[in-house]
């Protein structure tokens, strides 16, 4: 053996002896430390622990990410559900129904035990209209336990707010006479009362301002401040009250009305007669002669033969054409003539001939001309504004009378058609955006002045209407029917809730149902490209605006040939119907005036929707398939509602308010 081999053998000496306890063992360990042939196994074994931590960490991180994502989704869903359930109301409404809705939808999306999560906690609260959710859960670790991480706690937050864009809402409301009745006998209030309450609660929901109305949503207090929210009104019936919202330059100075004109005589002498003047009772022949000669007798005082004067007062002279004999039994007799009331006995009917001569020094009344006549209405204008009244010489004998103007209007030039979709050329009355031009009379409006109207050939004792122009001394009357609703309101923010409900409370039901005029002016007052474009196109800061027109009616179109509406008196003016034949009317009938209202409404509905205005239509009343189908076609798709009673109406307005208010996640 070599020395080395011998040495190695000696170092492997077994236990024993003094030197064996130190040298051989120390040598073995030294050799082991220097020997690299078995190190791989040791290194691999030592690396298993950190490697398990790294792999396990990746797996657990994935589990944590998935779990947190699911928690976030569930939290978001719960916050949205809670805010939607809250609507325009309060968090505590209906025993905290919004909070319960938030919890329920969260639970439907994530439950204790999902993804191994435990100690699940979710809390939803509300402040200033914003719902905030806080969710936490404990997730057990798997392989990362080997490095001492046994659990991880996850926490997520979520918010949901009911956020309005800049919004315009125009209420076009039927305030006709039928609104003064109940929708159903079991209602405790009239349809008008129900409408007022529903509109106030709508305002509370959208504007977030409290009124005196008791609304199911609770009492909001904060108010909308971050965006512009405006409300406008067009109450309609037979007409609309919009005149004073417009500058006077949009109105004609002269307009034709169904009226009368006093015909005057110039200064001069005018003879009336001779004509018969009958004594008031039967008298003797001698007294009849005295009456003829204008001399006194028992019960008779002679008539003054001159009166009036001096200039400019009219002077009147009277001559009694007596032949000195009170004859009887002839056509020209004075005492008991042929056909006299009393022709027998010692006392009989008596009459005399007289001639009157009037000498005038100023124009005096002669007679009336009745017809469609031009009237100067410029007296209502006061610069670009308005006077409350003006005067016209249509009183007794042509005297001036004061004529008040409430604000209702007569529409501008129109055409006669069977369809108005699209709006026909020439129908300037139905052109929503056409701005009037002072040089084009067909683009101008006129004030509706009922005090000017006379329906010719109709007296207080009766008579039939006559389309022809008539000159007569008779006093005809105004037999038309006129209704002017509460003044419309342009779009405004209405930050004062008291002012809002004061206006709503002023609505009064009366008149017939002309849907077209209401829809027309609702569109005009909110159009971004029409006569109020400078106010409606954008917010003052340049923001875009979403537009909603809410049209509510309780009845079908209902017209009357004698209604004085936005197109004059239907029977006389015939601006919408065949001028050669008398129009017909009625409610839910084939009357020519009623057909016009329905056809024009259909055309206007299409025009409104084409302007990117969301058109909401509410039918308030008993089921009527024909009318409801027509109104459904009028509305924007999916935006028609039927309300059968007062409770339904309140719910309907609430639903629309919630849909107009848009949900948006804020976290």
Image (cartoon, rainbow, N blue to C red):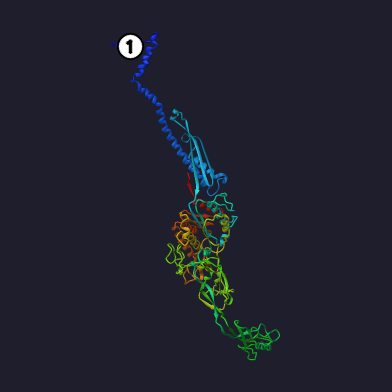
Question: Can residue 155 be seen here?
Answer: yes
> How far across and how far down the image is residue 599, in percent?
46, 63
Please tell me how crowded label 1 is: few (under 14), some (14-19), or many (20+) other residues with Cα within 10 Å.
few
Q: Report the front residue among 61 and 180.
A: 61
User: x, y percentage for residue 256?
Assistant: 50, 72
Total marks placed: 1
In terms of image quadrants, where is residue 477? bottom right
Camera-nearest residue between 101 and 489: 489
Q: Nearer the viewer, residue 359 or 414?
A: 359
**Residue at the extreme top of the image, as rendered:** 17
Q: Secondary structure at mark 1?
A: helix
Q: Position of residue 26 (x, y in %)?
A: 38, 14
| Res. 339 in view | no
Question: In terms of image quadrants, where is residue 271?
Answer: bottom right
Looking at the image, the residue that sits furthest to the bottom is: 324
Please tell me which residue is depicted at 45% across the width and 37% down the height of the picture.
67
Asked where in the image residue 269 lies, by quadrant, the reply is bottom right
Q: Which residue is mark 1?
A: 9
Instruction: From this view, report whether residue 53 is shown above or below residue 275.
Output: above
């Amino acid at each position: 053996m070599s020395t080395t081999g011998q040495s190695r053998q000696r170092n492997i000496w077994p236990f024993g002896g003094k030197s064996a306890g130190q040298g051989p063992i120390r040598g073995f360990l030294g050799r082991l430390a220097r020997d690299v042939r078995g190190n791989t196994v040791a290194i691999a074994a030592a690396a298993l622990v950190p490697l398990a931590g790294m792999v396990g960490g990746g797996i657990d991180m994935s589990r944590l990410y998935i779990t947190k994502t699911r928690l976030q989704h569930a939290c978001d869903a719960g916050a949205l559900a809670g805010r939607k359930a809250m609507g325009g109301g309060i968090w505590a409404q209906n025993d905290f129904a919004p909070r319960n809705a938030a919890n329920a939808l969260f639970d439907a999306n994530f439950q204790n035990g999902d993804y191994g999560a435990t100690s699940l906690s979710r809390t939803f609260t509300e402040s200033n209209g914003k719902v905030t959710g806080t969710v936490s859960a404990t997730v057990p670790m798997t392989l990362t336990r080997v490095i001492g991480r046994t659990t991880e706690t996850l926490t997520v937050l979520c918010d949901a707010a009911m956020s309005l864009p800049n919004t315009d809402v125009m209420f076009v409301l039927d305030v006709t006479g039928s609104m003064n009745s109940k929708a159903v006998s079991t209602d405790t209030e009239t349809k008008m009362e129900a409408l007022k309450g529903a509109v106030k609660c709508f305002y509370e929901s959208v504007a977030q301002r409290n009124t005196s109305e008791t609304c199911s949503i609770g009492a909001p207090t904060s108010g909308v401040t971050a965006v512009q929210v405006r409300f406008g009104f067009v109450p309609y019936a037979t007409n609309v009250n919009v005149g004073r919202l417009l500058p006077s330059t949009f109105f004609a100075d002269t307009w034709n009305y169904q009226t009368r004109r006093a015909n005057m005589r110039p200064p001069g002498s005018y003879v009336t007669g001779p004509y018969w003047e009958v004594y008031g009772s039967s008298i003797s022949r001698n007294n009849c002669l005295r009456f003829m000669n204008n001399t006194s007798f028992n019960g008779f005082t002679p008539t003054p033969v001159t009166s009036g004067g001096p200039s400019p007062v009219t002077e009147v002279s009277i001559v009694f054409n007596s032949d000195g004999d009170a004859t009887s039994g002839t056509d020209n007799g004075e005492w008991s003539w042929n056909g006299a009331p009393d022709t027998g006995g010692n006392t009989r009917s008596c009459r005399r001939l007289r001639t009157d001569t009037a000498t005038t020094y100023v124009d005096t009344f002669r007679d009336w001309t009745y017809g469609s006549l031009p009237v100067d209405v410029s007296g209502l204008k006061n610069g670009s504004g308005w006077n409350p009244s003006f005067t016209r010489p249509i009183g007794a004998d042509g005297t001036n009378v004061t004529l008040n103007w409430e604000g209702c209007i007569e529409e501008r030039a129109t055409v006669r058609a069977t369809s108005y979709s699209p709006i026909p050329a020439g129908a300037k009355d139905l052109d929503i955006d056409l701005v009037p031009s002072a040089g084009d009379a067909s683009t101008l409006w006129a004030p509706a002045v009922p005090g000017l109207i006379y329906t010719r050939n109709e007296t207080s004792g009766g008579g039939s209407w006559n389309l022809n122009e008539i000159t007569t001394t008779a006093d005809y009357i105004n037999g038309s029917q006129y209704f002017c609703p509460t003044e419309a309101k342009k779009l405004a923010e209405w930050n004062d809730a008291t002012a809002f409900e004061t206006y709503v409370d002023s609505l009064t039901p009366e008149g017939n149902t002309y849907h077209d005029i209401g829809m027309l002016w609702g569109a005009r007052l909110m159009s971004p490209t029409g006569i109020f474009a400078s106010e409606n196109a954008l917010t003052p800061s340049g923001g875009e605006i979403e537009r909603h027109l809410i049209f509510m009616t309780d009845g079908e179109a209902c017209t009357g040939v004698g209604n004085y509406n936005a197109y004059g008196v239907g029977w006389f003016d015939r601006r919408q119907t065949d001028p050669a034949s008398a129009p017909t009317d009625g409610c839910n009938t084939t009357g020519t005036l009623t057909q016009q209202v329905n056809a024009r409404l259909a055309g206007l509905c299409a025009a409104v929707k084409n302007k990117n205005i969301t058109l909401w239509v509410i039918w308030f009343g008993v089921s009527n398939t024909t009318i409801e189908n027509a109104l459904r076609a009028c509305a924007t798709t999916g935006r028609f509602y039927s309300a059968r009673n007062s409770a339904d109406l309140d719910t309907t307005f609430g639903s629309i308010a919630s849909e107009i208010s848009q949900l948006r996640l804020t976290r």
